[in-house]
Image: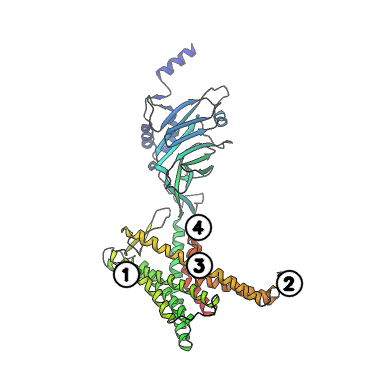
């Protein structure tokens, strides 16, 4: 009699909702618990069984003795090994395990930064974030209890286009309201991202991830940049006076080239500081032509600095590699035409295109704050093309001078061998004179790398980690001091 009553109650009050819409479950949970709607969705979605196949939703009972393969959409696939299903079922006698897979719009997952004053857990200083692939999140649940620490991980397959260069498999961490990659590994093929995870949750793939820096580090980097740039401008100004005095006593080509490079560096740092502080003015429309002019001057100074850096590398090559027969008629005049003429030609072409103006910089911190600088107008389509050309030119100069520095190192090694340095190769028996000479050669190479602009090659580290950003900022904001110290101790 008891079983008959239970059967009748089941018919009158079914535990599953037939004919429901999965989107209605999301809406209901957001209305009831807007901040913790994912937990509500996890608890209630298993009761939803649509009468017809719903797009992006699967709710089935599967045999735990075989691997489960579900495809809620054509771009998503879930593979749950039989070992995981057998662990998930409540009792060994249970013949089936309920598995739910659904695809949800990623806009419903919004990060809400927590208050620092109330937070007990220290906040991460660096996060890897990106765009959610196709803007879709894959939810997977099996059984009625949370599933974690699986010995044999489940596989989540996300199909992608060729434009996605990289991606990271993540899951939604509800307690911290952010994406987390813990417990998941990523494998990329020609057309798929394969996520292997040891738990079940809301999953997504963040494509083309960017390095995110917290607000405190943004302020620290800005302080280093402005102070370092101001010091560089000061020391470049002093160096220029020193070179003028030395040039009056003895007219040398190397001194003239150093003067040009120092002048370009002075213009670069003054242009950067002026463009940065002018953009702080509250009125964006008033005197906009001034910001455009400062942006043009900054671009010209940057090109001039790197052009003269390349000239330094070329002159160094003539001095150390081609020692004989290096006379060139009107050598300095030709170098000046290249060093100052090339950047002038470039900005003369870009100026009429109205490329220069206010440029919006994304701080990429937790609050997505932005700052501005007088550089290139970020609203003009031509800005990207000019930026790519400028970056390509800088890369070529750094690559060229890197080759020049290697040639200098090999030349120094040959000179040391010619003086009999190969008599003893044992570091323990090396005399103090040879040891001091080794340190001097190391300082020479380090100083030359600063003069040749090689620290700009550290820009590649800014896409890797936070220390790389600090190294790039410190070395290049202090380039004026480096050139001052290098050139004034007579390394050349």
- Kindly state the secondary structure of the residue where label 4 is placed: helix
Q: Residue 262 or 32: which is nearer the viewer?
A: 262
Kindly check if marks 2 and 3 are in contact, taking CB atoms under 8 A apart as contact.
no
Q: Which residue, given by chain and number where applicable, does mark 2 sit on?
A: 429
Q: Earlier in the sequence, mark 4 or mark 2?
A: 2
Q: Earlier in the sequence, mark 2 or mark 3?
A: 2
Task: Give the alpha-carbon distance from disc 4 to disc 3, as whole Å.
Answer: 20 Å
Residue 407 screen position, x and y as percent: 56, 70
**In this view, 105 is above or below 143:** below
Q: Which residue, given by chain and number where applicable, does mark 4 sit on?
A: 466
Residue that protrudes farthest toward the bottom in the picture = 249
Kindly check if marks 4 and 2 are in contact, taking CB atoms under 8 A apart as contact.
no
Residue 146 screen position, x and y as percent: 51, 34
Task: Give the alpha-carbon distance from disc 2 to disc 1, as whole Å.
Answer: 61 Å
Q: What residue do we see at 41% from left, 74% from top?
A: 264
Q: Earlier in the sequence, mark 2 or mark 1?
A: 1
Give the quadrant of residue 31. Answer: top left
Task: Give the alpha-carbon distance from disc 4 to disc 2, as whole Å.
Answer: 41 Å
């Amino acid at each position: 009699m008891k079983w008959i009553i239970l059967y009748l109650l089941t018919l009158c009050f079914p535990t599953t909702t037939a004919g429901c819409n999965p989107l209605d479950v999301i809406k209901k949970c957001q209305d009831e618990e807007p901040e913790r709607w994912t937990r509500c969705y996890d608890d209630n979605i298993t009761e939803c069984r649509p009468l017809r196949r719903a797009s992006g939703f699967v709710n089935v009972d599967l045999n735990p003795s075989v691997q489960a393969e579900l495809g809620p959409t054509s771009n998503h696939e879930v593979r749950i090994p039989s070992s995981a299903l057998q662990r998930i079922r409540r009792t060994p006698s249970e013949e089936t395990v309920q598995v739910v897979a659904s695809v949800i719009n990623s806009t419903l997952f919004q990060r809400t930064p927590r208050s620092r004053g109330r937070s007990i857990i220290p906040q991460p200083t660096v996060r890897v974030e990106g765009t959610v692939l196709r803007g879709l999140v894959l939810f997977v649940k099996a059984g009625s209890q949370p599933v974690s620490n699986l010995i044999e991980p489940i596989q989540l397959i996300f199909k992608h286009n060729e434009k996605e260069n990289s991606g990271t498999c993540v899951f939604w961490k509800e307690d911290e309201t952010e994406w987390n990659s813990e417990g998941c590994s990523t494998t990329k093929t020609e057309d798929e991202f394969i996520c292997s995870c040891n738990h079940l949750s809301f999953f997504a793939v963040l494509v083309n991830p960017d390095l995110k820096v917290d607000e405190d580090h943004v302020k620290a980097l800005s302080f280093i940049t402005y102070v370092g740039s101001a010091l560089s401008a000061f020391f470049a100004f002093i160096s220029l006076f020193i070179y003028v005095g030395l040039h009056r006593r003895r007219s040398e080509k190397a001194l003239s080239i150093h003067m040009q490079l120092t002048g370009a560096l002075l213009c670069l740092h003054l242009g950067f500081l002026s463009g940065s502080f002018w953009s702080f003015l509250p009125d964006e429309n008033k005197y906009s032509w001034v910001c455009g002019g400062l942006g043009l001057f900054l671009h010209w100074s940057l090109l001039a600095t790197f052009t003269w850096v390349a000239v330094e590398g070329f002159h160094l090559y003539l001095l150390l590699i081609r020692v004989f027969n290096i006379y060139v008629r009107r050598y300095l005049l030709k170098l000046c035409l290249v060093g100052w003429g090339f950047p002038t030609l470039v900005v003369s072409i870009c100026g009429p295109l109205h490329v220069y103006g206010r440029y919006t910089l994304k701080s990429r911190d937790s609050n997505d704050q932005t700052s501005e600088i007088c550089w290139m107008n970020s609203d003009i389509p031509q800005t990207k093309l000019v930026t790519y050309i400028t970056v390509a030119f800088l890369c070529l100069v750094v690559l060229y001078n890197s080759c020049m520095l290697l040639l200098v190192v090999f030349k120094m090694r040959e000179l040391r061998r010619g003086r009999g340095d190969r008599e003893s190769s044992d570091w323990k028996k090396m005399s103090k004179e040879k040891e001091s000479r080794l340190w001097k050669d190391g300082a020479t190479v380090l100083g030359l790398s600063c003069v040749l602009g090689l620290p700009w090659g550290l820009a590649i580290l800014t896409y890797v980690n936070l220390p790389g950003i600090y190294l790039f900022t410190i070395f290049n904001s202090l380039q004026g001091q480096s050139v001052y110290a290098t050139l004034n101790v007579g390394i050349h």
